[in-house]
Image (cartoon, rainbow, N blue to C red):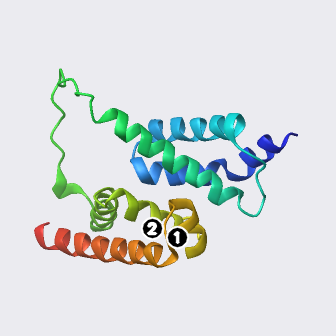
Amino acid sequence: MTEIEALYRQYASAVFRFAWGLCGDRSLAEDIVSETYVRLLTKAPEVETQTALAYLLAIARNTYVSGVRRRWREVPLPDAVPAPDIDHGARLDGQARLQAVFDAIRGLPEGERAALLLRVDHELSYEDIAAALGTSVGAAKVRVHRARVRIAEGVRHEGRTS
């Protein structure tokens, strides 16, 4: 087994969760994972195993940001068939609260969302988060804190309007 295969087997699911958290789209997250490993294979220097996850997540984030920059010029086609109305009254409270959390996460600025996902989902240290995001440790802590505050406000706001 090559080093790339070992890294893929060990970290692909973590990279996928991170990418999905950033973009909120399973198909796009799979593309980001694929592109991450292609970039690792074609452009990466020797990867230290202690920093491999942080390095892979940094590549995934950069891939996502590059894609966002490219897609801002795209214009979506109008839907031929309107989406069916969803009966919001039939949803359970737990599902509504979970959806409010997901909506709040998707509404975060990209830097805060990335920092939060690295901290909560991947349990990276603030030092590793700072390295992955190319920022200081203090800025990484601030981003995580702001993300948590915004999510709490978003969920609280959702509870009042539902």
- Determine the residue positioned at 46% across, 36% down: 27
Q: Which residue is mark 2?
A: 116
Is residue 107 shown left or right of residue 136?
A: left
> On residue 119, which mark appears?
1
Is 1 in front, or is 61?
Answer: 61
Quarter holding the N terminus is: top right
- How many neighbours does mark 1 have within 10 angstroms: few (below 14), some (14-19), or many (20 or more)? some
44 relative position to 134: left or right: right
Q: Residues within 10 Å of mark 2 (few under 14, many from 20)?
A: many
Q: Which three-letter amino acid code belongs to the residue tagged 2?
A: Leu
Q: Position of residue 14 (x, y in %)?
A: 61, 54
Taking the spot 65% from the left edge, 47% from the top edge, the residue there is: 12
Image quadrant holding the C terminus, namely bottom left
Residue at image position (65%, 34%) is 38
Q: Give coordinates of residue 76: x percent, y percent.
A: 23, 28
Q: Residue furthest right?
A: 1
Callouts 2 and 1 close, C-beta under 8 Å: yes
**Amino acid under label 1?**
Arg
Which labelled disc corresponds to residue 65? none
Whether residue 112 sits left or right of residue 89 in the image: it is: right
Q: Say which quarter of the image contains residue 2.
A: top right
- What element does badge 2 sit on? helix
Task: Indicate the position of residue 18 as horizontal and vertical percent values.
Answer: 52, 54
